[in-house]
Amino acid sequence: MTDTISDEKVLFLPNKKGVVAILVLIFLLAGIGIRLLDFTDMPLDFASTRQLHSLIMARGLYYQMDTPDTRSMPQDLRSFGINAGKAEPVIEPPIMEHLVAYTYSIIGGENIFVGRVYSILFWVLGGIPLFLMVRRLISVNGAFAALAFYLFTHFGVYASRSFQPDPMTVMFILWALYFQVRWSQADTLKNGILAGVFTGIAILVKAPSIFFTGIPFAALVLHKGFKYWIKNWKIYLIAVLAILPAFLFNFLSATVGGKGGSIFGARFFPQLWTDYAWYLSWLKMLKSVAGHFVLLVSLFGFFLISKKETRWFYGSLWLGYLLFGFVFAYHISTHNYYHLPLLPIIAIGFGQVFAMVYSRLEAVNRDWLNRILIVVLFIFSYGLCLQRVRGSLIASDYRYDATYWTELGKKIDRNASVVALTQDYGYRINYWGYINPTLWPTSEESTIKNLQGATDPAFLQMFKELTAGKTIFLVTIPGEFETQPQLKEYLFDNYPYEQGDGYYIFHLDRPLHPNSDQG
């Protein structure tokens, strides 16, 4: 199908351009509305480490700007924020962070929810290319079903509120896929350039996007046959436009910028492929993201696709996801936001199944009352989504955390030299407490080291190395502290401490046995 209007009814309404546009707008506004629930809670309910990383970078970029707000703030806090932002690893271009920092300068100060607003908008706007693409590939009602799943599925609502590049990445992936489909159906220079540019933007924003844009593009090309792609110069133009921006950024970052370790390190663990438990962890993560039932419905959608090119395209999306999972084996089984690009893939299959179900509903239920009841059921399903999301969001309240970490930073003294066993790589005490601690490794970090073939040194040696010149050892993860009995016993035996709500502060500069060798 193309973007032209067909004779098919749209949820029992006339399939007119204005009707479709209004319904899409209603869906998009409802998608924004459901994401505004519990909007002012702190960004710790989802991927807190990743969000705080972006918040620290955005703050550092903002503090470098010359604005009335930055000029009036204490110089030591401004310098700390700038240095903390510069110290953050740069894996992909900090587009979101720059955008948020610039917004801070416009509104006259930091607002922790600016990043959330942008993520919501990017994700919801990604519904537009998804709708246009599925309408071309399946039908207009299939497109509305895909859009509904994309906007209202529980995990998608949660994850798309997160200040990180992934919601924007998914939006650009969808625009890239839409223009690739348009180009495959109408091989014009304009469509080719648009396909190449948006594919290039998606890969630039986050390099792993190549799995979700490059493989489908290859499938569309290969489906047309050898003679077609070997002679069509526009294919090579699209490939150059797609690859060049990310290649230049990563080359310059790894060489001139010295970011090679951040870009290429600690991400590829093929030894997990032979671990049965890893596959179970991956499946468990899939269940938490989409649910096994919806996942299976979407997979069945593949077998319901009659057009061979569309089936190739949809199958290539799943292939891209599988290859992505094997390349990023550790993260696919431990980081739920790595599954975000899967949601529009599932949405397409869901749209295919619904399109066939809707055709049957329309054929059987010609009575206007039945049709009204069916629409009421659709609206009721949105209410159920709203209820579930609201229940999950209000179940946890993180508003106190900002005060907690701010006060803890003041209690420790921002000029203290700190080593810490703490959450989120020390980002919480960094962002709110203006303290940048040296990190004592957690069990998870030790697991990653083991996968890399590295090991920590002996306890006393590591303790001496990490606490050299430090005055405070901060513990804010009591549960993790319990899993490291050697550390716990050593600190309690050798240093005075203060205990508070969820933390211990050990004073390394006041050892209980000053004449002994405690490191």
Image: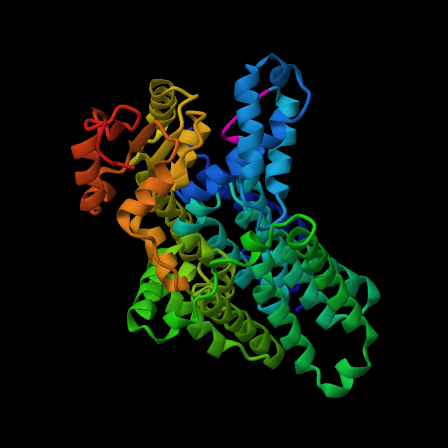
Check the image and name the residue furthest to the top: 72
Q: At 64% across and 56% down in the image, what residue appears?
A: 202
Determine whether 317 is above or below 86 in the image.
below
Residue 47, picture quadrant:
top left
Count the numbered circles shown: 0
Residue 360, picture quadrant:
bottom left
Residue 139 is a magenta residue: no
x, y percent for residue 167 = 54, 48
Q: At 66% across and 24% down in the image, what residue appears?
A: 106
Horizontal arrangement in the rendering, residue 366 relative to residue 10 (left or right): left
Q: At 22% across and 37% down in the image, what residue appears?
A: 478
Which region is colored magenta?
Answer: 109-113
Horizontal arrangement in the rendering, residue 297 relative to residue 216 (left or right): left
Determine whether 302 is above or below 408 in the image.
below
x, y percent for residue 59 = 56, 30
**How has the structure been colored for display?**
rainbow
Horizontal arrangement in the rendering, residue 504 relative to residue 399 (left or right): left
- Quadrant containing the N terminus in the rendered view: bottom right
x, y percent for residue 349 = 48, 68
Nearest the camera: 50 or 232? 50
Determine whether 454 is above or below 438 in the image.
below
- Quadrant containing the C terminus in the rendered view: top left
User: Is residue 241 something one can see in this rendering?
Assistant: yes
Determine whether 370 is above or below 138 in the image.
above
Q: At 44% across and 32% down in the image, what residue appears?
A: 436
Nearest the camera: 287 or 449? 449
Horizontal arrangement in the rendering, residue 478 relative to residue 229 (left or right): left
User: Is residue 45 something one can see in this rendering?
Assistant: no
Q: Main secondary structure of the magenta part?
A: loop
x, y percent for residue 246 = 68, 57
